[in-house]
Image: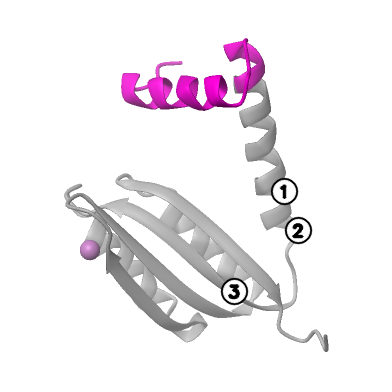
Amino acid sequence: MSLPRKLLNEFDEVLTDRGYNSRSKGIRDALKDYIVRYQWMKDLEGDRVGIIAVIYDHHYPGVMEEITDIQHQYRDHINATMHLHMSEKNCLEVIIVKGDASEIRNLTEKIMSLKGVEHVKLTTTSSTKNN
Ligand code: NI
C-alpha cells in the first residue's frame, strides 16, 4: 500500500488534533468508518430526495467533463446543480437529486470513483416521509 505524502501528512495532523497516539489505530478507525458509510449507502432504498456535495480539483485533466457527462446520464434524477468556485484549485458542486435509491447510489459512486474528485458527501432522506 502506498499513499501520497500530502494525504498522510493531513491524516497525521487529524490524528494529532484528535489526540490519537497511534497511526495504526487511526487507520483502523478510518477504514471502519469507510465501511460503515458504504454499508449505509448500500442499504438505502425507496424513493429518496437528497444532495450530493462534490469537491474536486478542476485542474485535474478531464474531471470536469466526466462530472458533466455523468450528470447528463442521470438527468432524470437531478433537479438542479449549483457550482461554486471555491479556490484557485477546487470547485464545489452541489447536486440536488430525487428518485430511486439505487440510481442515486450509482450516480454518487460514479462521481466518487473519478480521479481528481477529492470529497463526495451524499445526504438523503425518504421522499415519501410524512414528517
Ligand atoms: Ni469551479
Q: Secondary structure at mark 1?
A: helix
Residue type beneath disc 1: Gln
Q: Does the magenta run of residues contain 28? A: no
Please indicate whether residue 34 sits to the left or right of residue 54 in the image.
Answer: right
Residue type beneath disc 2: Asp
- Quadrant observed for ligand 1 in the rendered image: bottom left
Image: 86 above or below 27:
below
Label 2: how many residues lie within 10 Å, few (<14), some (14-19) or many (20+)? few
Residue 43 is marked as 2
In the rendered image, which residue does mark 3 sit on? Answer: 50
The quadrant in which residue 72 appears is bottom left
Q: Secondary structure at mark 3?
A: strand
> Magenta residues, as a range?
1-26
Image: 123 above or below 76:
above
Count up the numbered dots. 3
Residue 42: image x %, image y %? 70, 55
Please indicate whether residue 47 sits to the left or right of residue 130 in the image.
Answer: left
